[in-house]
Image (cartoon, grey):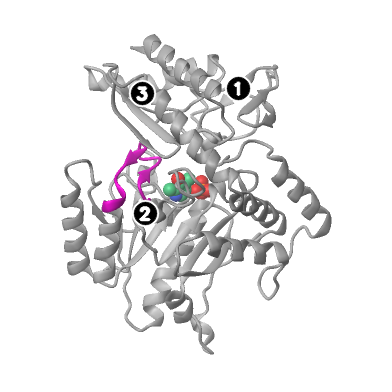
């Protein structure tokens, strides 16, 4: 680390409190290697994107080969084999009924595209609807539209005047599921909304809040009954995180629109997709140019990113990948069990490969301050963990070993001893 100030402005970083960044020079499997020689275990998959492991050789080789062949091409009026392979592969893996694939380059953008598809659909069928229903504590990205459908708070207070109004259903906490379903039905009947957007089974940035497939299934049924489009934001939950390739499969539902990003390229390159059913695509299909889906970004379906996604899909077609996911889920369950009767924690929870637990303290105000302290302790322990408030969670790449997990959970144990 040099002493000179860097001109770089980092994401979600308060530079006044955290002036030093850790320089990383290499990634390998579940580990990051720092410039000073430290080996850091990546317990949050580098913000939920790395699935198989860092520098997964199968994906790296596909990127290298594609970079030599075709780097970039305008995607309006043109296509290429990597994109076609990704689209075909996605339709094999995604819930039945999703039939069209729109490319973009981040999770937030895939959400913007989903919202635009929903509003375009209703306008084009001549029955305009514009209101969006969301779930309390949701997160869908940091662009203006994505923030509008996400939880409001300190993170977006400055932009509040630009955010559009939405209807909110409460989070279906254990024992209060019916209140969520009743609220959704009431809003659907009263507001005639265009769409309901939801993170299936796990609300990530909201604190790794989990709810069961039966609730997801029932919310989908209610939307169906009122002609409200169901948008599944699987940006985080996709690619095995919840134990299945996509969370919607556990509720046996087919959303009208689905957003995938993060693990789409195995966590190697930025790429996102928004999938939709025939009805939505066909509502945009007309000789009338005004019905065109007016959305693009410069790097739509970048061939190198698509080659990475295509290689990722190949890995998902091999039985080893779901087997790894199941093994990590089982290992996570064993690790979490060590805290089962530990009074320092509450709300131990797991969904597939994700575990989370809340720090329990007598003084609630104290909890808000423990996050940075925990993070500093983890940093000194060479474990990459970033608690969400008083929630500690583990979301590792699937190449993680039981020994690696043991290191992670031992660090949690020691860190909490240190701060409480
Ligand atoms: C991370 C995330 C997003 C935003 O994805 P980016 O690629 O960071 O823009 C959207 N939705 C969910 C559920 C996410 O976890």
Q: Is residue 44 above or below residue 375?
A: below
Q: CA distance from mark 1 to mark 2?
A: 35 Å
Circle 3 — which element?
A: helix
Q: Residues within 10 Å of mark 3 (few under 14, many from 20)?
A: few
**If you read the primary sequence from the N terminus, does the residue marked by circle 1 or circle 2 appear first?**
1
Under 8 Å from ligand 1: the CB of mark 3?
no
Q: Is residue 15 above or below residue 107?
A: above
* Residue stretch rendered in magenta on the structure: 199-214
Circle 2 — which element?
A: helix
Residue 25 pos. (x, y %): 71, 28
Query: Which of 178 and 319 lies nearest the eye of the viewer?
Result: 319
The mark found on residue 148 in the picture is 2
Q: Are marks 3 and 2 in contact (CB under 8 Å)?
A: no
Residue at image point 51% right, 32% down: 44
Residue tagged by mark 3?
337
Q: Is residue 296 above or below residue 197?
A: below
Q: Residues within 10 Å of mark 2 (few under 14, many from 20)?
A: many
Residue at image point 49% right, 60% down: 94
Residue tagged by mark 1?
40
Image quadrant for the N terminus?
top right
Query: Which of 61 and 35 lies nearest the eye of the viewer?
Result: 61
Point out the residue furthest to the top here: 418
The mark found on residue 99 in the picture is none
Does residue 386 appear left or right of residue 298 in this picture? left
Residue 47 pos. (x, y %): 52, 37
Tell me the chief SS of the magenta region.
loop
Residue 343 seen from this side:
yes
Q: Which numbered disc, 3 or 1, marks the residue closer to the eye?
A: 3
Residue 216 pos. (x, y %): 30, 54
**If you read the primary sequence from the N terminus, does the residue marked by circle 3 or circle 2 appear first?**
2
Does residue 78 appear left or right of residue 226 in this picture? right
């Amino acid at each position: 680390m040099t002493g000179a100030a860097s001109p770089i402005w980092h994401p979600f970083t308060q530079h006044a409190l955290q002036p030093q960044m850790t320089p990383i020079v290499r990634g390998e499997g579940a580990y990051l290697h720092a410039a000073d020689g430290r080996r850091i275990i990546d317990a949050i998959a580098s913000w939920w994107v790395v699935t198989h492991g860092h520098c997964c050789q199968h994906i790296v080789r596909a990127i290298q080969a594609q970079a030599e062949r075709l780097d970039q091409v305008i995607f309006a009026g043109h296509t290429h084999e990597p994109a076609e392979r990704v689209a075909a592969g996605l339709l094999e893996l995604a819930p039945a009924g999703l039939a069209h694939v729109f490319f973009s380059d981040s999770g937030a953008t895939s959400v913007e595209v989903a919202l635009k598809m929903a509003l375009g659909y209703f306008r084009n069928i001549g029955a305009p609807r514009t209101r969006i229903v969301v779930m309390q504590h949701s997160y869908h990205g940091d662009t203006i539209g994505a923030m509008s459908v996400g939880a409001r708070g300190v993170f977006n207070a400055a932009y509040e005047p630009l955010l559009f109004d939405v209807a909110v259903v409460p989070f279906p906490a254990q024992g209060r599921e019916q209140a969520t379903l009743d609220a959704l039905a009431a809003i659907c009947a009263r507001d005639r909304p265009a769409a309901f957007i939801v993170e299936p089974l796990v609300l990530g940035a909201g604190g790794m809040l989990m709810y069961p497939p039966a609730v997801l299934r029932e919310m989908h049924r209610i939307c169906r009954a009122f002609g409200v489009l169901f948008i599944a934001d699987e940006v985080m939950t996709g690619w095995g995180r919840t134990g299945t390739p996509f969370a919607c499969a556990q509720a046996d539902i087919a959303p009208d629109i689905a957003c995938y990003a993060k693990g789409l390229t195995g966590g190697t390159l930025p790429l996102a997709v928004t999938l939709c059913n025939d009805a939505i695509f066909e509502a945009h299909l007309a000789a009338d140019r005004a019905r065109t889906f007016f959305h693009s970004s410069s790097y739509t379906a970048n061939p190198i990113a698509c080659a990475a996604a295509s290689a990722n899909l190949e890995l998902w077609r091999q039985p080893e990948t779901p087997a790894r996911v199941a093994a990590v889920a089982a290992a996570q369950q064993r690790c979490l069990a060590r805290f089962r009767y530990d009074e320092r924690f509450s709300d131990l929870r797991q969904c597939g490969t994700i575990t989370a637990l809340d720090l329990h303290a007598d003084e609630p105000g104290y909890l808000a301050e423990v996050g940075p302290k925990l993070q500093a302790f983890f940093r000194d322990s060479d474990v990459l963990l970033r608690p969400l408030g008083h929630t500690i969670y583990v979301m590792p790449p699937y190449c993680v070993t039981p020994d690696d997990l043991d290191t992670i959970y031992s660090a949690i144990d020691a860190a909490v001893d240190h701060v409480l």
